[in-house]
């Protein structure tokens, strides 16, 4: 959630950010109007209370208190009624009241873009920052991962469809083991870099979803149990970011770095007809999520470190990739700045997203009430939150199968992963 004080102080900056995202900037004017009404109501409450106190004091100071009370009591009663009405009006407009129109607008306002985010309306305007590795040249026609997996007997989409419908997969034998090996590899590397491993709940409350910016913007993309009022997590970012919600941290604790291996669940309702085959876009998938809580001054340096942590995994797995800075129109609702890491996928002759690393500044922390004190007597400040995939397991498996394939249909497993997988290659 945006800071109402920021909107009040720099409305033109907020308008510019909205326009860069391709959004309507008129809500800024609505926020300012409701905020003015809210603050006017608060001022009127204070003035009415001051007048009521003055009249009450006049009764106490009068020589004939009974006479003064008879004269002033009607005015005091009238002021009491007025104060009650003004307080009700102020509460109805408060940015902290879920029912207020001001809160409704703020809930749907995206984060303020950092000035370094490139201009542009869609992914075609994303800016490549760097590349690592060189895509392999094949002396045969490379096959897509679903053909490779089915021939090896490690991927089964037909049986998954009978079990659950489209966009599910069954991994068996070496495929299941390779997937588990990737998760263990990612978690071990995260631990070496100082991340604390967390095993969070996979079902979370509406408040948790809202506090991390998933509601109400992305409600249609979530799997939801109406009776229990619980959501299946769309990403490990949700429970990891909200883990310290409502707490005031000591500055010495920062940065906090968490890692979690979780299944994730998404309807992918807006992706009809796209990546319908294979593991690229599933309703259920796994990834290792990396989350930072840090102080505001360090968060953009932390974004570079977080992105580097994710990149290092692809380097160890010898998978070519590139890093792109997302343009304004492609940057997510929660994010102030995002780098996508895209791995080379031979079957598509293209780079495809495997990790998205974002600095959400104080946007989520303000919703989740994650604060810290610089010293014992200091005023609490909102922390900054960051998140990134380190990495998406299924998409890494795609890249391993397709980049490691041989002419005879076998797959060479990267050396760094062999101790986790227990084998160096897969053969038909």
Image (cartoon, rainbow, N blue to C red):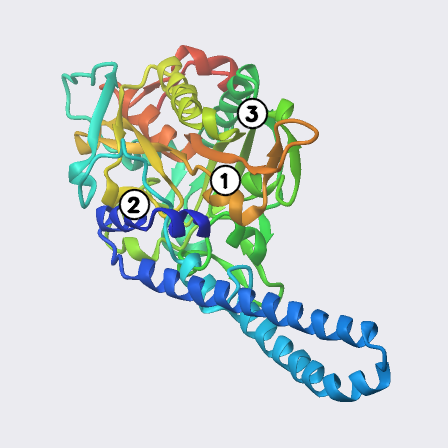
Mark number, residue 176 = none
Task: Tell me: residue 3, above or below residue 315.
Answer: below
Q: Residue at x 40, y 45 (%)?
A: 334
Circle 1 residues within 10 Å: few <14, some 14–19, many ≥20: many
Of mark 3 and mark 1, the one earlier in the sequence is 1
**Along the horizontal axis of the image, is 326 left or right of 416?**
left
Give the labeled residue for mark 2: 13
The residue closer to the viewer here, 194 or 107, is 107
Circle 3 residues within 10 Å: few <14, some 14–19, many ≥20: some
Residue at the limit of the structure toward the top, as seen here: 415
Give the labeled residue for mark 1: 237
Measured as percent of width and height from the top left, residue 276 is found at 28, 49
Alpha carbon separation for disc pair 2 and 1:
28 Å
The residue closer to the viewer here, 417 or 7, is 7
Write down the quadrant of residue 345 in the picture: top left
Give the labeled residue for mark 3: 255
Circle 2 residues within 10 Å: few <14, some 14–19, many ≥20: some
Measured as percent of width and height from the top left, residue 279 is found at 35, 40
Is any atom of residue 1 visible in this view?
no
């Amino acid at each position: 959630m945006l800071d109402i004080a920021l909107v009040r102080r720099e409305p033109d900056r907020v308008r510019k950010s909205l326009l860069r995202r391709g959004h309507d900037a008129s809500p800024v004017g609505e926020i300012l109007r409701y905020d003015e009404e809210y603050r006017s109501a608060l001022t009127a409450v204070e003035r009415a209370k001051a007048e009521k106190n003055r009249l009450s004091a006049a009764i106490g100071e009068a020589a004939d208190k009974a006479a003064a009370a008879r004269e002033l009591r009607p005015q005091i009663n009238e002021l009491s009624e007025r104060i009650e009405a003004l307080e009700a009006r102020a509460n109805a407009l408060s940015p902290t009241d879920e029912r207020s129109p001001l809160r409704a607008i703020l809930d749907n306002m995206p984060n303020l873009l950092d000035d370094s985010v490139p201009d542009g309306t869609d992914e075609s305007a994303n800016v490549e920052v760097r590349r690592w590795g060189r895509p392999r040249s094949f002396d045969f026609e490379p096959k897509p991962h679903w053909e490779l997996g089915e021939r090896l007997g490690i991927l089964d989409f037909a049986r998954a469809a009978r079990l659950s419908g489209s966009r599910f997969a069954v991994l068996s034998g070496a495929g299941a083991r390779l997937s588990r090996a990737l998760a263990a590899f990612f978690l071990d590397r995260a631990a070496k870099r100082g991340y604390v491993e967390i095993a969070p709940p996979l079902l979370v409350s509406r408040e948790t979803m809202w506090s991390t910016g998933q509601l109400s913007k992305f409600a249609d993309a979530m799997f939801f149990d109406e009776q229990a009022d619980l959501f299946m997590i769309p990403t490990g970012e949700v429970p990891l970011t909200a883990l310290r919600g409502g707490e005031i941290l000591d500055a010495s604790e920062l940065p906090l770095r968490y890692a979690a291996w979780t299944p994730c669940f998404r309807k992918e309702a807006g992706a009809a007809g796209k990546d319908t085959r294979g593991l690229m876009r599933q309703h259920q998938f796994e990834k290792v999520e990396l989350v930072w809580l840090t102080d505001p001054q360090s968060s953009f340096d932390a974004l570079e470190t977080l992105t580097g942590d994710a990149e290092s995994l692809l380097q160890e797995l010898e998978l070519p990739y590139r890093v792109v800075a997302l343009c304004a129109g492609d940057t997510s609702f929660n994010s102030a700045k995002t780098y996508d890491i895209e791995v080379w996928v031979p079957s598509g002759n293209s780079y495809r997203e495997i990790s998205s690393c974002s600095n959400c500044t104080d946007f989520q922390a303000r919703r989740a009430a994650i604060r810290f004190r610089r010293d014992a007597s200091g005023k609490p400040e909102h922390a900054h939150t960051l998140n990134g995939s380190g990495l998406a397991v299924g998409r890494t498996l795609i890249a391993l199968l397709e980049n490691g394939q041989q002419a005879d249909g076998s797959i060479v497993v990267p050396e760094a992963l062999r101790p986790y997988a227990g084998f160096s290659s897969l053969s038909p």
